[in-house]
């Protein structure tokens, strides 16, 4: 039976608490016009991808976030760089291995290759946590979508800096 | 597969049921994969409902649920998904925005939300959109054809740009109805 972890409290970007460390702004250029703003935080033993956005159905600005054990960050970085981005001959994954997962302290974290990530025909990856529920729908998994080009143009290096400092 | 479309972008778009902007110039890339199947395109198949079952379970069941995924691989579910997408766009939501997906699912019943989540994962992770037929042929909008063309779905972990591919022949597409 799948165990659902207690939710971490939603981070308020305008009222960051002492146990919440803002480590990076993540810029999604395709969603800028919507006013959506995303940051990575360290909160206790977790990496939190936190987003402030306008809920068009309820006509209110709200927060949502995805949470991953900090221990999983070096694995996420490695699986993208040395798994998805390398050919099998170089130790990477074949195109038939499009989903990888691993458990960290009772939380199963996975990465899926995505053909249309944040836009049509934009390849990328979905990083999911099957043991935590979406704060909006109360359903699993939590998911964080990252286009490949963002990772290749600097985000993966930023994640490495965070991993070196906090993991 | 596209012989009767010749080089007219609107005809090609109608046969594939994709959009075509009359003010945009299009090219057609013909790629000879030769012997280098391991370089790209090795995971290629005709996406019928039956052929989707194995990859859907292998790649998506761990996070979206095996039962939910099995339940959306059919024509009846496709009709429901297409209707949901009409509602989705009517609400002004972006189908590729994670928060938009969540707020839409919040408006559905638990069962509908679970089905939509599984089915929409096929859309974003594989590409099967609201017009997906499941019979191996593309949807068709061309008046002279009853069916579209045979569809080939290629799943890649790290797709390379056309500019990086070898043995590529590029043809400029000339609209029939333009000078």
Image: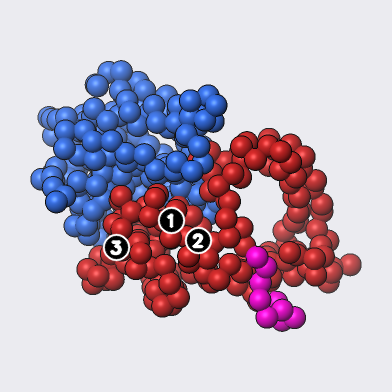
Chain colours: A blue, B red
Q: Which mark is residue A161?
A: none
Q: Is residue A45 above or below residue B16?
A: above
> Which residue, given by chain and number where applicable, does mark 1 sit on?
B54
Q: Is residue B76 left or right of residue A53?
A: right
Tag 2: Cα neighbours inside 10 Å, few (<14), some, or many (≥20)? some
Q: Residue at x 39, y 26 (%)?
A: A78
Is disc 1 in contact with disc 2, using a CB cutoff of under 8 Å?
A: yes
Q: Nearer the viewer, mark 1 or mark 3?
A: 1
Q: Residue at x 79, y 48 (%)?
A: B170
Which quadrant: the C terminus of chain B? bottom right
Instruction: Choose the circle earlier in sequence order: 1 or 3.
Output: 1
Report if residue B26 is visible in the image. yes
First to last magenta residue range: B142-150
Magenta part mainly helix, strand or loop? Answer: loop
- Calculate the distance from the C-alpha at mark 1 to the C-alpha at mark 3: 13 Å
Q: Chain of mark 2?
A: B
Is disc 1 in contact with disc 3, using a CB cutoff of under 8 Å?
A: no
| Image location of residue A30, percent across then percent down | 47, 48
- Calculate the distance from the C-alpha at mark 2 to the C-alpha at mark 3: 17 Å
> Which residue, given by chain and number where applicable, does mark 2 sit on?
B51
Q: Is residue B21 above or below residue A98?
A: below
| Image location of residue B141, percent across then percent down | 65, 76
> Which residue, given by chain and number where applicable, does mark 3 sit on?
B67
Residue B19 falls inside the magenta stretch: no
User: Mark 3: which secondary structure?
Assistant: helix
Instruction: Choose the circle earlier in sequence order: 2 or 3.
Output: 2
| Image location of residue A147, percent across then percent down | 46, 42
Q: Is residue B91 left or right of residue B28?
A: left
């Amino acid at each position: 039976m799948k165990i659902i972890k207690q939710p971490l409290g939603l981070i308020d970007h305008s009222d960051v608490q002492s146990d919440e460390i803002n480590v990076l702004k993540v810029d999604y250029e395709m969603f800028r016009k919507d006013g959506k703003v995303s940051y990575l935080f360290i909160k206790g033993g977790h990496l939190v991808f936190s987003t402030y956005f306008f809920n068009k159905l309820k006509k209110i600005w709200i927060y949502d976030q995805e949470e991953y054990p900090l221990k999983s960050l070096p694995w996420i970085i490695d699986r993208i760089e040395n798994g998805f981005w390398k050919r099998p001959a170089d130790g990477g994954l074949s195109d038939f291995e499009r989903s990888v997962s691993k458990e960290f302290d009772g939380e199963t974290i996975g990465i899926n290759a995505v053909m249309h990530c944040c836009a049509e025909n934009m390849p990328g990856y979905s990083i999911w946590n099957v043991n935590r529920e979406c704060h909006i729908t109360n359903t699993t998994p939590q998911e964080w979508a990252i286009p490949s080009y963002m990772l290749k143009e600097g985000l993966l290096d930023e994640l490495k800096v965070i991993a070196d400092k906090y993991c | 597969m596209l012989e009767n479309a010749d080089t007219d972008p609107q005809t090609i778009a109608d046969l594939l049921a994709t959009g075509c902007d009359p003010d945009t110039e299009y090219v057609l890339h013909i790629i000879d994969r030769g012997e280098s199947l391991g370089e790209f395109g090795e995971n290629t198949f005709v996406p019928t409902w039956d052929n989707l079952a194995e990859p859907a379970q292998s790649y998506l069941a761990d996070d979206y649920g095996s039962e939910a995924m099995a339940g959306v691989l059919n024509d009846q579910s496709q009709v429901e998904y297409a209707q949901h997408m009409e509602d989705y766009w009517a609400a002004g939501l972006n189908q590729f925005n994670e928060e938009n997906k969540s707020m839409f699912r919040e408006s559905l019943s638990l069962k509908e939300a679970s089905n939509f989540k599984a089915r929409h994962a096929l859309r974003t992770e594989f590409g099967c959109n609201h017009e997906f037929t499941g019979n191996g042929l593309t949807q068709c909008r061309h008046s002279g054809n009853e069916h579209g063309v045979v569809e080939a779905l290629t799943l890649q972990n790290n797709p390379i740009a056309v500019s990086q591919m070898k043995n590529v022949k590029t043809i400029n597409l000339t609209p029939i109805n333009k000078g």
